[in-house]
Image (tube, rainbow, N blue to C red):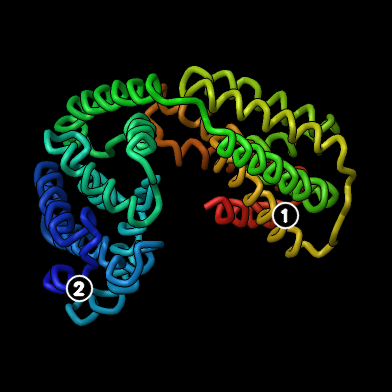
Amino acid sequence: MPKLEKELPSWLTYHNAQHTKNVIEAAEHLAVTENVSGRDLVILKTAALFHDSGFLENHQRHEELSCQFAKKYLPDYEYNDEEIELICSMIMATRLPQTPKEELAKYLCDADLYYLGTEEYDSYAKKLFAEFKKTGFVKTNAEWQIKQADFLATHNYFTPTARGERDLLKKKVLQKIKSSVKTIQSHSHKQSLRESVQDTIFIVCGVILASLALKGFLVPNHFFDGGVTGLSLLVHEIYHFNLAIVIVLFNLPLIIISYFSVGKVFAYKTFISVILLGVALVLVPNLALTEDKLLISIFGGVFLGVGVGLVMRAGAALDGIEVLALYTLKRTSFTITEIIMGINIFIFTIAAMRFGVETALYSILTYFAATRSID
């Protein structure tokens, strides 16, 4: 803790030593309330202590850096390899969207965001806003309000204690922020010409790259991706339906859902993006740029991921899988990550059964490359 207090950058107004102390206290409270004790409690508190230590070196990918710190220092304090691996897994689970695999990780994830349902939410949010402005994650208060509303609407606590103690007030906080967003939107002017041109360029470039990935790498070599694009490719390969039509048809219901659950502007931009992708897929012939399976997986995934990412930068989507996950989340107990993972497991399992395990494995690599490129 003294190292965090002395060496963390001063511009970290939220992810500072006090935040780590708060997470340790919240983790201990949640665990003790649910009868976690002994060595498990020690491991949980240790993970809480190290979970943001990566900020000592870099705010980007700080979870990996935190794990490196844990692996460096914990052996000196009689933590065995198994315990250190568990601690690292718990730390990685705090990366958004949170994905706890172990029970102890659920306590850490909830403790890390325990402030969401408190009276002090505004104070913490201001500190986080100042920090995000410094890193360029957000630029304006209006943008920050929208991001808060989106995050709170999809966030779920994992432990019964956290849900019981925080959900009610978190809903009130969300309603307050939604009111603020409506006020901002009602007084805001239409997008400037420059912003509109920029978004158009992002969408067009994104669509071109995505269509190149599909027609130049994946389709000619019978490879797949995850999400709605993966389902479309699967249907195209099995039933030989036109890929452009299948992608548009599969995305249309999700665009309609997004109109009501996300917003009109997002739905309109997504509709235009998907239609443009359909047109591009009709116009672009199968190119088969390479037959090397590793190159197909990596570059097909990268081009597709960059294309999707550019469209997302414009405030739209080329793949409605997250909209589907968000819609399903409200009707089940599964997290968004679990829902997306379940859909992708289905896609790659069918691919393995129909086209071979090797094709499925390379397709998983494609999906991984696309996901990292989107990030």
Name which residue lies at 69% across and 31% down.
274
Q: Which quadrant of the figure contains the N terminus?
A: bottom left
Q: Residue at x 13, y 57 (%)?
A: 18
Q: Would residue 346 be seen by someone viewing this image from the given angle?
A: no
- Residue depicted at x 54% and y 36%: 315
Judge from the rendering whether residue 27 lies leftward or rightward of residue 187; answer left or right: left
Residue at point 24%, 59% (across, down): 12
Residue nearest the observer in this picture, 194 or 352: 194
Please report contact status of discs 1 and 2: CB closer than 8 Å, yes or no.
Answer: no
x and y percentages locating residue 226 in the rendered image: 63, 43
* Circle 2 residue: 7
Occupied quadrant, residue 156: top left
Query: What amino acid type is highlighted by mark number 1?
Result: Gly
Q: Which mark is residue 37?
A: none
- Asked which secondary structure carries label 1, the reply is helix
Q: Residues within 10 Å of mark 1 (few under 14, many from 20)?
A: many
Q: Nearer the viewer, mark 1 or mark 2?
A: 2
Horizontally, is 257 left or right of 162 in the view? right
For this rendering, which residue is in front, 271 or 250?
A: 271
> Callout 2: helix, strand or loop?
helix
Residue 95: where, in percent of width, then height?
Answer: 37, 52
